Amino acid sequence: MALVDQEQMEDTAYRLSEAAPGDFIALLKPRVMSLVVFTAFVGLAMAPGVTNPLLAVISIAAIAVGAGASGALNMWYDADIDAVMGRTARRPVPAGRVTAGEALGFGLVLSAFSVATLGLMANWTAAALLAFTIFFYAVVYTMWLKRSTPQNIVIGGAAGALPPVVGWAAVTGTVSMESLVLFLIIFLWTPPHFWALALFKSGDYERAGIPMLPNVAGHAATKKQIFIYALLLAVSGLLPVVAGFATLVYGLVAAVLGVGFVWYSWKVLRMPESDTAMKPAKALFGYSLLYLFVLFTALLVDRLLVSLGLVF
Ligand code: HEM
Ligand SMILES: CC(C)=CCC/C(C)=C/CC/C(C)=C/COP(=O)(O)OP(=O)(O)O
């Protein structure tokens, strides 16, 4: 909390605010978490065995609430740095519409509720994985790594990669090679996804004193790292075929998407330092979102085609 007016934070922390319901929804980071929840759903849908549809809905709802809860805990802890970044200054806590105490309480209650629901309704392996994911994002990434190392999002990205593992475990009660392949894809996807944004928002992070790679190692080094991760990601996108849980139909889509990712990253690598508009970095950030959504949709469609006997 070093960068905010400490007195003002203490003053607002424990009184009740006049927040609108929409402010509490905003604490859940709904747009980001929608893709997180979608990847969890794909993990659940790819798992072997017939799932009771009601149990599937409850499991996904519990994961969604847990993901949102971790967003609220992140916004509670990060209120000081969010206040000084243009992109985040209007969030409920730094804008003063929700108190820090309310955000913390909301995040903790929803975390406990989501983990307990998943444990009681599905199984305790999945619940433990959900608890670990929330802990990793809220404590390991937000409280520790984010402010201390430029590798923050590489290591912290493990949290964002876990939801399909949780979804799979909700059905099977186990962690499998297949769900770890899905983990690996998102793990390798996260650095280029985030560093593309960090390139064109590096001023924000500089002001907030956060050691993101572009501020610490410079733009040239970040662009190289993005390109390396893009190559690794393009290859890892093919692993579901190699591991035998997707067909060549998925493989074709993954190959095209992977070439696209490398192409967009190449454009970023070739972007001159003098390019202040940074259109290639903005394009790569947008493409990263499309990539993950379409890749995971392709896995679902591929599985559907196999179950209909249309593809072998
Ligand atoms: C440590 C890992 C990650 C970091 C540091 C990160 C960072 C960010 C940031 C800073 C934004 C801009 C957010 C905003 O201002 O609204 C963003 C957007 C987004 N991220 Fe990530 N992200 C990470 C992982 C993920 C994961 C795992 C997913 C989903 C699987 C994801 C999905 C999204 C989506 C959908 C958006 C766009 C939200 C919008 O429409 O505004 N991110 N990410
Ligand atoms: C099931 C479950 C618990 C899922 C959690 C998944 C997870 C860790 C997603 C991380 C996504 C995210 C918004 C990172 C933002 O980084 P940031 O917090 O540094 O971004 P900001 O500057 O926008 O706050």
Image (cartoon, rainbow, N blue to C red):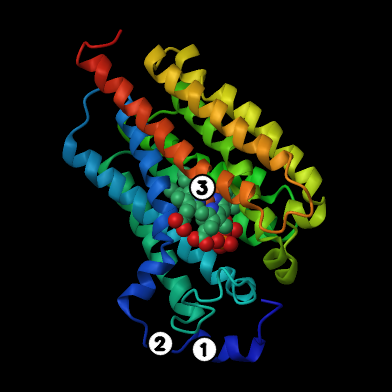
Which residue is painted at 25% across and 44% down in the image? 121
Query: Eyeballing the image, is 294 above or below 238?
Result: below
Q: Is residue 55 left or right of residue 215?
A: left
Pointer 3: what residue? 286
For the C terminus, give its image quadrant: top left
Q: Position of residue 114 (x, y in %)?
A: 35, 54
Q: Residue at x 37, y 72 (%)?
A: 24
Q: Are marks 2 and 3 in contact (CB under 8 Å)?
A: no
Q: Is mark 3 within 8 Å of ligand 1?
A: no
Q: Can residue 213 be seen at all in this image of the molecule?
A: yes
Q: Label 3, label 1: how many angstroms apart (C-alpha)?
A: 36 Å
Residue 137 seen from this side: no
Q: Tell me which label, 1 or 2, sits earlier in the chain.
A: 1
For residue 303, which quarter of the picture?
A: top left
At label 3, which amino acid type do we have? Gly
Q: Label 2: few (<14), some or many (≥20) within 10 Å?
A: some
Determine whether, in the image, residue 214 is placed left or right of residue 85. right
The local secondary structure at tag 1 comes to: helix
Task: Point out the tag, 3 or 1, that comes first from the N-terminus.
Answer: 1
Label number found at residue 71: none
- Circles 1 and 2 in contact, beta carbons < 8 Å: yes
Residue indicated by mark 2: 17
Q: What whole-number distance in Å separates the C-alpha atoms at marks 2 and 3?
A: 35 Å
